[in-house]
Image: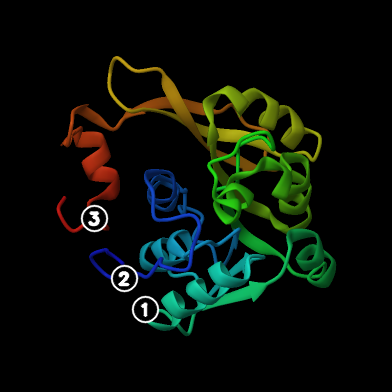
Amino acid sequence: MFQFKQFTIKQDKCAMKVGTDGVLLGAWAPIAHNPFSILDIGAGTGLIALMLAQRSGAEQIDAIEVDDDAYEQAVDNFEDSSWGDRLFCYHAGLDEFVEEMEEEEYDMIVSNPPFHDENYSSGNLQRDRARCTASLPFDELAQAAAALLSKNGVFTIIIPYKQEQAFTDIATQYNLTPFKITRVKGTPESEIKRSLMAFSFNNIPAEVNELVIETARHQYTQEYIELTKEFYLKL
């Protein structure tokens, strides 16, 4: 169980536990356009949807999760939160969901997609499936986002930095271009590890910056504290 300031995440059934990537995406995702409807693709525990329920006034926050256990966990976490009436989880794969919801539009779409290739193995099949790119190919994700996103909507993801250009190239094929990119480093000396990316149909130059998480072990930077302090109990 993981306790945040305004909600609790149960994660005993989930292959993918609460991690820095999910917290970063939930805290960073741009909401200045005041989204009415939000979709979280690959909900896992429901963490990102819950963070966006806390941050935004969105009245419709949907999530989709294909894994049986993770779906049940997300539903439980939604129901146990203060925002249960705004949160709904669909038990479906992405292609099935897009087909079913082709008339639906979302003002914001978020995803913390799997990114290990299919040759990676941790010895835990459920965890490997949750982290394997083959279970949610980038092309399928970009295509679905373009199909479901409203005209002035925002599509936000977190991916490995080394895949930033490849994903940008794929998204551009669906008329989605990045307008904000934050590259994340663990420490000032370490290599860039992740890219937080926000896309839209408006072709405008991207605002690009860097975020360093800590200067030493558990010595968090002011930028990281500012980003996450509304969620973590100890910040």
Residue type at mark 3? Tyr
| Relative to 17, residue 223 above or below | above
Residue that mark 2 sits on? 8
Residue type at mark 1? Ser
SS for callout 2: strand
- Across and down, in percent, residue 56 comes to 42, 64
Mark yes or no: residue 90 visible: yes
In this rendering, position of residue 16 left or right of residue 117: left
Mark linked to residue 232: 3
C-alpha distance separating marks 1 and 3: 16 Å
Whichever of labels 1 and 3 marks the residue nearer the N terminus, that label is: 1
- Across and down, in percent, residue 41 comes to 62, 58
Is the C-beta separation of discs 1 and 3 under 8 Å? Answer: no
In this rendering, position of residue 3 left or right of residue 46: left
C-alpha distance separating marks 3 and 2: 11 Å
Q: Nearer the viewer, residue 202 or 91?
A: 91
Answer few, some or many: residues within 10 Å of disc 3's Cα (few below 14, many 20 plus, some between 14 and 19). Answer: some
Residue 162's image quarter?
A: top right
Is the C-beta separation of discs 2 and 1 under 8 Å? Answer: yes
Residue that mark 1 sits on? 81
Answer few, some or many: residues within 10 Å of disc 1's Cα (few below 14, many 20 plus, some between 14 and 19). Answer: some
- Across and down, in percent, residue 140 comes to 78, 47
Q: Nearer the viewer, mark 2 or mark 1?
A: 2
Answer few, some or many: residues within 10 Å of disc 2's Cα (few below 14, many 20 plus, some between 14 and 19). Answer: some
Q: Nearer the viewer, mark 3 or mark 2?
A: 2
